[in-house]
Amino acid sequence: MTTDPIPDSWRNALDNALGTAEARQLGGWLREQEEAGKVIYPPRGQRLRALELAQLDDVKVVILGQDPYHGPGQAHGLSFSVSEGVKIPPSLVNIFKELETDIGKARPDHGNLDHWARQGVLLLNNALTVEANKAGSHAKAGWAAITDAIVSAVAERDKPTVFILWGSHAQTKAARILAHKGSAHHLVLSGPHPSPLSSYRGFFGSRPFSKANAFLAANGRAPIEW
């Protein structure tokens, strides 16, 4: 089990996943890592923040990444987001560049994406924790059972939803989305990760924000104010 409580709107959907051996071991493993002196990001109390801000019934868009930022003060529970006052990381700089090109929105002066989450954008990573300065260090820690179940819970609904999968790690979830009966009423947008290492391989010019809003509007759901 994780060290943070599951928000109420997600609890029933995640019951089976939380009962797996992998998920049960996760909380204990994270405690052991911290007791050994390892710094884990984001801190306790913020690890399931994406679920707190985006209630299951309200999810319109899922943006899936790899794992949290691994620098001090960066990760706060939402993929790609940082708190106000924290320098905007390169991946998010590129997201804002594409946002400006795509829909003409001026780049903000901070990287806090709470306002996306509160509109039903689930900002999720494959793994929801990471050891300081070690990208991908918790990729096999047990989060997969939980994040798979989160994605499945959204895909199982009959509400048309946009899934934006950035990077190869995120794209492993595509089969899970498409496996659900009725998945044809969802839109899956797969593309390169927005990091400087891959953004020029097709991330720029992919126009995910306008595509997401056009899909939502066509299906009777309010678009996102990006």
Image (cartoon, rainbow, N blue to C red):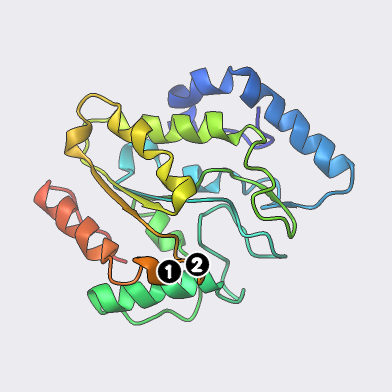
Residue on which the image places disc 2? 195
Residue 104: in sight, yes or no? Answer: yes
Q: Is residue 35 left or right of residue 164?
A: right
Q: Residue lying farthest right? A: 36
Measuring from the top left, give residue 155's x and y in whole percent. 31, 33
Vertical relation: 132 (above or below) 158: below
* Amino acid type of the residue that numbered disc 2 sits on in the rendered structure: Ser
* Total residue callouts: 2
Q: Is residue 126 left or right of residue 42?
A: left
Q: Residue at x 20, y 59 (%)?
A: 211
Q: Which mark is residue 14?
A: none
In this view, the residue in front, 202 or 61, is 202
Q: Is residue 129 left or right of residue 37?
A: left
Residue type at mark 1 is: Ser
Residue 62 horizontal/vertical position (percent): 37, 48
Marks 1/2: CA distance? 6 Å
Residue at 40 percent across and 41 percent down: it is: 55
- Residue 138, compared with residue 155, is above or below; it is below
Res. 178 image quadrant: top left
Location of residue 181 with respect to 218 vertically, above or below: above
Marks 1/2 in contact by CB < 8 Å: the verdict is yes
Where is residue 156 shown, x and y percent of the image?
30, 28
Instruction: Classify 10 Å Cα crowding around label 1: few (below 14), some (14-19), many (20 and above).
Output: many
